[in-house]
Image: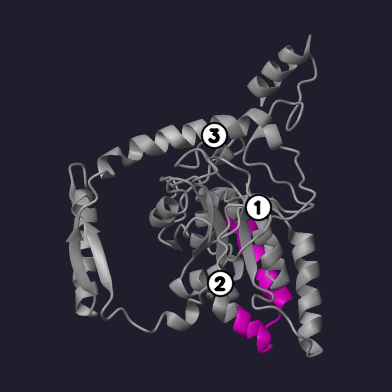
Amino acid sequence: MKVTELTALQIRDGIAKQEFTSEEVIKQFYEIIKEKDSEINAFLTLCEEASLEKAREIDSKIAKGEKVGRLAGVPIAIKDNICTEGTTTTCASKMLEDFVPPYDATVIKKLKEEDAIIIGKTNMDEFAMGSSNENSAFQVTKNPVDTERVPGGSSGGSAAAVAASFAPFSLGSDTGGSIRQPAAFCGVIGFKPTYGLVSRFGLIAFASSLDQIGPFAKTVEDCALLLEVIQGSDELDNTSSKTAEYPTYLDKLDQGIKGMKIGVPKEFFGEGLDNEIKEAILKAIEDFKALGAEVEEISLPITEQGLSAYYLISSAEASSNLARYDGVRYGYRTKEFDDVYDMMIKSRTEA
């Protein structure tokens, strides 16, 4: 059986029923990665030895009838700006080329608690600033749908990994479209969760008031499962939602949308909208109506100022966040310098 063609839910259930082992799953995914990733360049780091060790541990627990997590044995790829204890986290920058975090991001802890297996760290635009994945310091990721095209960014490696069947799902981060755009380019499911729903602790910051970790997958069901696992309040993130109870999603996917109100901003149909995109949106609106939703035209008059506001906020916050990479507090340090100021300038220039 080609497990690389299965969804995350199918892999999880197959392992639980002992139709195949977690070790078999991990080996099959690494086979396809080794065969095809030299062309796609989705991964910066692979964790093969640790992944196989974890898979054997899970298989042993299942064989003994011991309790395992909701994602037991399922492989996942992680964007390389999310801290992973003991595994290099570079942000696709020479500044952090040798950075090995001493701790896990909260989302990584949650994944490990549910026995997911991290198979590798994915390429991205440097420090998550870009929209094509051509701005990595190490390699350019290609779109598995058409290798002559970009996968989008900045989470292009995570989107490409799912599209190429290197992993059933993955994590990315989204500041101004960095999950949504590559998901669209690569033909997979991806979205930016509500700010505060998922902890940002351990996510290396670009623009702190806009950054949010979110999922990629081939199906809505897999995205729902992954979001259920990574969401939740976190005392280590002071912008984390303090909601006592978080919703479930998988059990609501079959409830339909009858009676739901959907607003369609008229400003979104302004000058510059590609006709193909417009037709796809209009078709979706008709589909929603056919399913019983109430679709209404609404107005968001400040839409025109949205991009300008984004550039102002994200650039200001990025300049503050990236100031720490000076060779003193964090990151690469040049070998030859005259004084501390010269060292900072050379370190930042070289990296």
The secondary element bearing badge 1 is classed as loop
The secondary element bearing badge 2 is classed as helix
> Which of disc 1 and disc 2 is earlier in sequence?
1
Q: Amino acid under label 3?
A: Ala
Q: Amino acid under label 1?
A: Phe
Image vertical order of residue 254 relative to residue 229, above or below: below
Residue 223 location, x and y as percent?
Answer: 50, 69
Q: Which mark is residue 346?
A: none
Q: Which mark is residue 318?
A: 3
Q: How far apart, in angstroms, are the residues tagged by discs 1 and 3?
A: 17 Å
> Which of disc 3 and disc 1 is earlier in sequence?
1
Q: Quadrant of residue 245?
A: bottom right
Image vertical order of residue 57 relative to residue 175, above or below: below
Q: Which mark is residue 228?
A: 2
Residue under circle 1?
Answer: 201
Q: Amino acid under label 2?
A: Glu
Q: Where the C terminus falls, by quadrant?
A: top right
